[in-house]
Image (cartoon, rainbow, N blue to C red):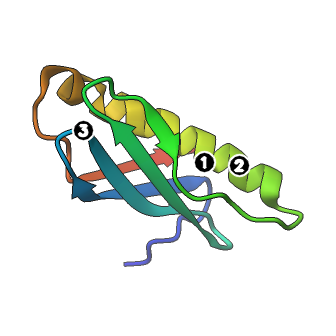
Amino acid sequence: MSTRPTAGVRFVLMCTLQEPDFAVYEGFAHLPERDVPLGYRIALPSGAVSVVDSGPTNSVAEVEAELRRTGAALLRAATKSEAASGQALPRKVVRWRG
């Protein structure tokens, strides 16, 4: 099975580190033609999500920046109730967007 979609974007994020006051998620936005690396830090217990990696410096920077913003919003939605209640965060978050 390929991780690349034939259309749209597949976001795959894994929790790589969880501490009492933050968690780190890393993964990719899989596009039909390439993969964009993503990294986020979630502040606990507020659930605020910030982008960890600085992003590219080439001509596709705007598209990749939009993917990073979308990924942050998806991660926030997937973890906000657990973060607010002090429960364990999901180990893996996978979402498709059209």
Which image quarter is the C terminus in? top right
Tag 2 residue: 65
In the figure, is residue 69 to the left or right of 20? Answer: right
Which image quarter is the N terminus in? bottom left
In the rendered view, would you say 77 is above or below 24?
above
Disc 3/disc 1 C-alpha distance (Å): 22 Å
- Is the residue marked by circle 1 packed among few (<14), some (14-19), or many (20+) residues within 10 Å? many
* Tag 1: amino acid: Arg
Q: Which of marks 1 and 3 precedes in the sequence?
A: 3
In the rendered view, would you say 22 is above or below 15?
above
* Tag 2: amino acid: Ala
Residue 4 pos. (x, y %) = 52, 70
The local secondary structure at tag 1 comes to: helix
Tag 3 residue: 21
Quarter residue 64 falls in: bottom right
The residue at 20%/53% (across/down) is 91
In the figure, is residue 10 to the left or right of 53? Answer: left
Quarter residue 83 falls in: top left
* Tag 3: amino acid: Asp
Tag 1 residue: 68
Residue 17 pos. (x, y %) = 25, 58
In the rendered view, would you say 18 is above or below 86?
below
Residue 88 pos. (x, y %) = 11, 40
The local secondary structure at tag 3 comes to: loop
Q: Which of marks 3 and 2 precedes in the sequence?
A: 3
